[in-house]
Image: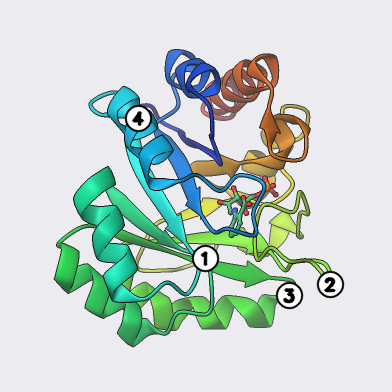
């Protein structure tokens, strides 16, 4: 496995999925949230997941979804892990983990050091945490808003589970974000798009290259 883990989230087309896989993404995210411009139907998701299987981990991203709907995604799409990006409780996350027997990642919205305390509750049940910025006021989306938070807050963070950094990353700032936060895993959506919900192949390649080269420089 690469030394920096890279997730490209919100892929909706075969071309952009192929670009993410060819660029060497470790994880690819499929969004199941109808309000999102990146929402995929179950049939689209099955096709995209089949392309990725064996090349990258397929992440099913959901927001406050009930167990029946999660089960349908699990059976049909067969993701490698679930990402919960809503206000799911630790109990709901634990229930899904037991039911599906798969790793789960919980998104935690950060705007100040106090928010990191919430992460400690989720670190008990989730396999990984994903730190994202709080959504701007009035946003319909709990994530994928292209907004960043103070990366320095994560420096020297002592948690029993690994974390992934997300929120407002792009090819031009991912290097600095990795250096300042100490993250060993990064996630991007808007920062590799040319329009809201429309991924850009060149930006995907540039993001993966920038994240990987940063780790090599930082590790010297
Ligand atoms: O991407 C979405 O549309 C989305 C919708 C609902 C919940 C979460 C969503 N995305 C979450 C992600 O994993 C994003 O990659 C993460 O929030 C970073 O997004 P961005 O700031 O746009 O890179």
Give the structural element (helix, strand or loop) at label 1. Answer: loop
Depth check, front residue: 145 or 175: 145
Q: CA distance from mark 3 to mark 2?
A: 20 Å
**What x and y, as percent, mark residue 80?**
26, 46
**Horizontal relation, residue 67 to residue 118: left or right:** left
Q: Residues within 10 Å of mark 3 (few under 14, many from 20)?
A: few
Residue at which label 4 appears: 47
At 35% across and 57% down in the image, what residue appears? 82
Tell me which numbered mark, 1 or 4, is placed earlier along the sequence: 4
Helix, strand or loop status at disc 2: loop
Residue 128 drawn at (x, y percent): 38, 60
Q: Residue furthest right?
A: 137
- Does label 3 or label 1 sit earlier along the sequence? 1
Reading the image, the residue beneath label 3 is 112
Query: Which sits earlier in the primary sequence, circle 4 or circle 2?
Result: 4
The one of 142 and 157 positioned closer to us in this rendering: 142
Determine contact: label 4, label 2, CB under 8 Å: no
Q: Would you call the spot at circle 2 few (<14 residues within 10 Å), some (14-19), or many (20 or more)?
A: few
Residue in view at x 56 percent, y 48 percent:
39
Instruction: Tell me the distance, in whole angstroms, between the alpha carbons under discs 3 and 1.
Output: 18 Å
Location of the N terminus by quadrant is: top left
Looking at the picture, how far across and down is residue 31, in whole percent?
Answer: 50, 50
| Residue 102 location, quadrant | bottom left
The earlier-in-sequence mark between 3 and 2 is 3
- Residue 138 marker: 2
Mark 1 or mark 2: name the one nearer the start of the chain: 1
Q: Residues within 10 Å of mark 1 (few under 14, many from 20)?
A: many
Residue, disc 1: 85
- Give x and y (percent) for residue 32: 48, 54
């Amino acid at each position: 496995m690469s030394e920096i883990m890279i997730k490209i989230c919100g892929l909706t087309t075969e071309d952009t999925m192929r670009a993410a896989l060819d660029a060497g993404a470790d994880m690819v995210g499929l969004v199941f949230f109808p309000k999102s411009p990146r929402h995929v139907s179950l049939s689209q998701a099955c096709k995209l997941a089949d392309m990725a299987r064996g090349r990258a981990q397929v992440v099913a991203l959901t927001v406050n979804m009930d167990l029946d709907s999660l089960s349908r995604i699990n059976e049909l799409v067969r993701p490698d892990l679930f990402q919960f990006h809503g206000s799911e409780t630790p109990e709901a996350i634990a229930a899904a983990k037991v039911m599906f027997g798969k790793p789960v990642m919980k998104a935690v919205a950060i705007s100040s050091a106090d928010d990191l305390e919430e992460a400690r509750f989720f670190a008990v049940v989730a396999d990984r945490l994903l730190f994202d910025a709080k959504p701007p006021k009035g946003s319909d989306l709990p994530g994928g808003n292209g907004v960043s938070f103070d990366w320095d807050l994560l420096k020297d963070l002592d948690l029993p589970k690994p974390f992934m950094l997300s929120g407002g990353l792009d090819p031009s700032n991912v290097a600095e974000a990795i250096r300042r936060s100490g993250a060993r895993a990064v996630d991007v959506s808007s920062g590799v798009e040319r329009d809201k919900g429309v991924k850009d192949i060149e930006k995907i390649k540039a993001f993966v290259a920038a994240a990987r080269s940063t780790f090599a420089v930082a590790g010297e």
